[in-house]
Image (tube, grey):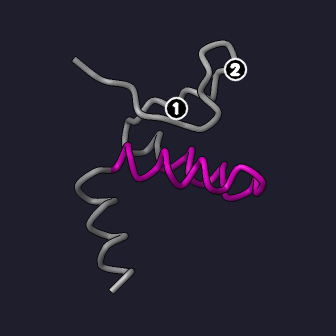
């Protein structure tokens, strides 16, 4: 059941899904590189956490 949920989230909410995965895997740089490549493949802009703006994890920016 978890696999279906993961696939659904990745298919329907790719930016949010990848932001969550990147935030979860901050200690594993190899996995982070894989997910950042996936973001590039899907044309999702990656903006790292910004200490000046108070974000401690990856987030999705609102697009217009």
* Residue stretch in magenta: 14-38
Magenta stretch encompasses residue 3: no
Question: x, y percentage for residue 2?
Answer: 38, 81
Question: x, y percentage for residue 35?
Answer: 56, 52
The image quadrant of residue 8 is: bottom left
Question: x, y percentage for residue 15?
Answer: 37, 43
The image quadrant of residue 5 is: bottom left
SS class, disc 2: helix
Which is more N-terminal, label 2 or label 1?
1
Indicate the quadrant containing the N terminus: top left, top right, bottom left or bottom right: bottom left
Q: Are there few (<14), some (14-19), or many (20+) residues within 10 Å of tag 1?
A: some
Residue bearing the label numbered 1: 46
Residue bearing the label numbered 2: 51
Q: Are there few (<14), some (14-19), or many (20+) residues within 10 Å of tag 2?
A: few
Magenta stretch encompasses residue 24: yes
Foreground tag (1 vs 2): 2
Going 60% across and 38% down the picture, which residue do you hit?
57
Indicate the quadrant containing the C terminus: top left, top right, bottom left or bottom right: top left
SS class, disc 1: loop
* Residue 26 numbered tag: none
Horizontal side, residue 40 vs residue 28: left or right: left
Q: Main secondary structure of the magenta part?
A: helix
Going 57% across and 44% down the picture, which residue do you hit?
36
The image quadrant of residue 25 is: bottom right
Contact flag, marks 1 and 2 (Cβ < 8 Å): no
Going 63% across and 29% down the picture, which residue do you hit?
49
Going 60% across and 15% down the picture, which residue do you hit?
53
Mark 1 to mark 2 CA distance (whole Å): 16 Å
47 over 37 or under it: above or below: above
46 over 12 or under it: above or below: above
Question: x, y percentage for residue 19?
Answer: 49, 44
């Amino acid at each position: 059941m978890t696999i279906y949920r993961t696939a659904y989230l990745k298919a329907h909410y790719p930016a949010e899904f990848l932001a969550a995965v990147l935030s979860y895997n901050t200690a594993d740089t190899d996995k982070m590189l894989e997910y950042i490549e996936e973001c590039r493949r899907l044309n999702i802009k990656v903006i790292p956490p910004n200490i000046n703006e108070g974000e401690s994890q990856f987030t999705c920016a609102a697009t217009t």
